[in-house]
Amino acid sequence: MQSQTENKSTLFLFGVALCINVFFFTVFAILGVFRYGALDDYFMSTVLTGAYGSKFDPHLVFVNGALAYCLMPLYYLFPSIGWFYIFQMASIFCSFTLFSYCLIRQLGFRLGVPLAVLLSAVAIEFYASVSFTICAPLLAASGAILFVKGCIREKTLWLAAGCILLVLGAMLRFQMFLLVIPFLGTLLLWAHFPFKVVPKKTLIALAFCGLAIYGVNTFDENLYNDSEYKYYKAYQYKRSFFGDGAHYDKEAISDELEERGMIPLDFQLLCAWNFYDTRVFSADSLDAIIKIANRNTYVENKQRLPAAVAMGISNAFTRNMAWCWCFVCILILLFAKKKSRLYPWVSLALVVASYIYLLQLNRLVSHVEMGIWLYATVMGIPLLRRDNAVVGEPSKIPSRLLIIVSLFALVFLTGTILSLPKENRNRAVFAVPEMSNDWRDFLEYANENINNVYLLSFYQYKDLGFVKDPPYKAAKSGSWLNIIPIGYWNINLPGMKRELEKRGVENPLRNIVNNNVFTIETGNSPSYQLFYKIHYHKDLKVDTVQTFGNLMVLKYREVSDGKITED
């Protein structure tokens, strides 16, 4: 009888948590815009669906290929649905539902619901900026909570579910998964302090989890053993050194390149994401520039590191998740066992350590920061116990505390809604970014001239990527065949190279003068003309052959002795 009552209570509390998160998802569906928060996610989804010719390609670079194979049956059964995006959105929804349920169950309905509302209001921010970088910590944190609870209560099912979610988090973004390990280790130490024997189930689950993560990482590495994909993967670090780097003195590098008889323009083009020349910007050629760049990196000033960490943490409080951590820490001080009341200081120390690590890597970006504060917040939830309340029984919880939490929840919700990206919406509900007539006309033109090649600069490629396909719809196989970036992480993709070769293009920037090769710009780019003259010793003339609003279809031709030469 007691078991049936407990099951009913569990279902009721889970139902409440579910309703809270359905409400916030509905708010986002009405007021927000469904889009990827990062361009990388969209183009990973296009690689997955074969937008550059292949039927299915699991080589996602940033995400483990094992996840691609997990999604593959869904793409085969329902090929028009964007399952990669659906998986990410479901990760956000399910994770915040789990967090809400844990809060309500451990703090009781009276205090747990307002705090669950406060935390779940932040989900809107995650929906609006969905990416693999912020979904990975959600999965890892959910897995860590279930794992810790399964360890404490010795429930095999919870341990297994925790392991699965931890592995999924590692598959989605391994580097973000690594940041959860200190938080998980802290909770496991707390659960077995002082000197409690770790249950065999926990040790076995940890071993299986470690082996599974090692296995999927090995599987992903083996996907790139093919010579074409091996070069494609090896090129990633070298191109990102210039595209993502801000840790070197650009003027000093340009000066040294000039002193050594090399070409500073090449470095400038690399930093501006214009590098699809397979000879000038080959992997071996980039090594020489990287060596010079490494000699001109900014000297690390460790004395300024504390100030940088303090500034980073203060900036984090302009977003909601850091404030959620504050509330959880306050409640731990009020509703946790005595030994658990050190968690606020331990979690802050782990946050500071994470900031120091990321600052030294020059990778402290907003999405990663959200993940760190998410770990610090939700990993404190298992420590909350309403029967250990300092303030007394749940029925005697001061009303002022409930009012304060509720008011902050309202402030979080209002602030999040006001900060949603302001974009043109194409419908009232489930809106996606509206494609301009310029891009719509260009795509129609490109489809009519499928044997031509249209080269887009990084910024044009980025603009088109955000609006071409609704994220919840899969990019059609072959839908990007003749639209090629001049610089992005997916250049040298074997499928892209095959499509270029079919159209007689082996080296895009060298073959920019081919009769069927055009560039899409909002203005003439004289750097291409100077680049071509330096490396291929020919002057170029550029003509506008078509316009679509602000978009121009440009044609470059070689000029020899004042005459235009046709390829």
Image: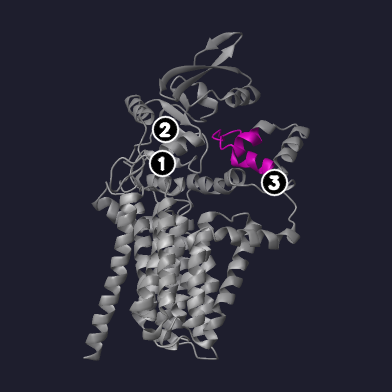
In the orientation shown, which residue stands out farthest toward the top? 562
Camera-nearest residue between 96 and 416: 416
3D distance between C-alphas at marks 1 and 2: 14 Å
In the rendered structure, the answer to whether residue 476 lies left or right of residue 492 reads left
Badge 3: how crowded within 10 Å, few (<14), some, or many (20+)? some
Query: In the image shown, does 165 or 404 lie closer to the viewer?
Result: 404
Secondary structure beneath disc 2?
strand
Which residue lies at the image location 74% right of the left edge and 46% below the top edge?
Answer: 296
For the question of whether residue 102 can be seen, the reply is no
Identified at 24% across, 90% down, the residue is 2
The residue that mark 1 highlights is 466
Q: Which mark is residue 483?
A: 2
The kind of secondary structure element at disc 3 is loop
Q: What amino acid is found at the position of numbered circle 1 in the picture?
A: Phe
Question: Which sits earlier in the primary sequence, circle 1 or circle 2?
Answer: 1
Given the image, on which type of amino acid does mark 3 rest? Answer: Tyr
Helix, strand or loop for disc 1: helix
Q: Residue at x 29, y 76 (%)?
A: 13
The disc, 1 or 3, on the residue closer to the chain's N-terminal end is 3
Report the Cα–Cα distance between label 1 and label 3.
30 Å
Query: Is residue 361 in the magenta section?
Result: no
* x and y, in percent, of residue 459 in the image: 50, 36
Give me the C-alpha separation between circle 3 and circle 2: 32 Å
Q: x, y (%) of residue 254?
A: 72, 36
| Residues in magenta, as a range | 266-290
Mark 3 or 2 closer to N-term? 3
Question: Can you identify the residue that label 3 sits on?
Answer: 248
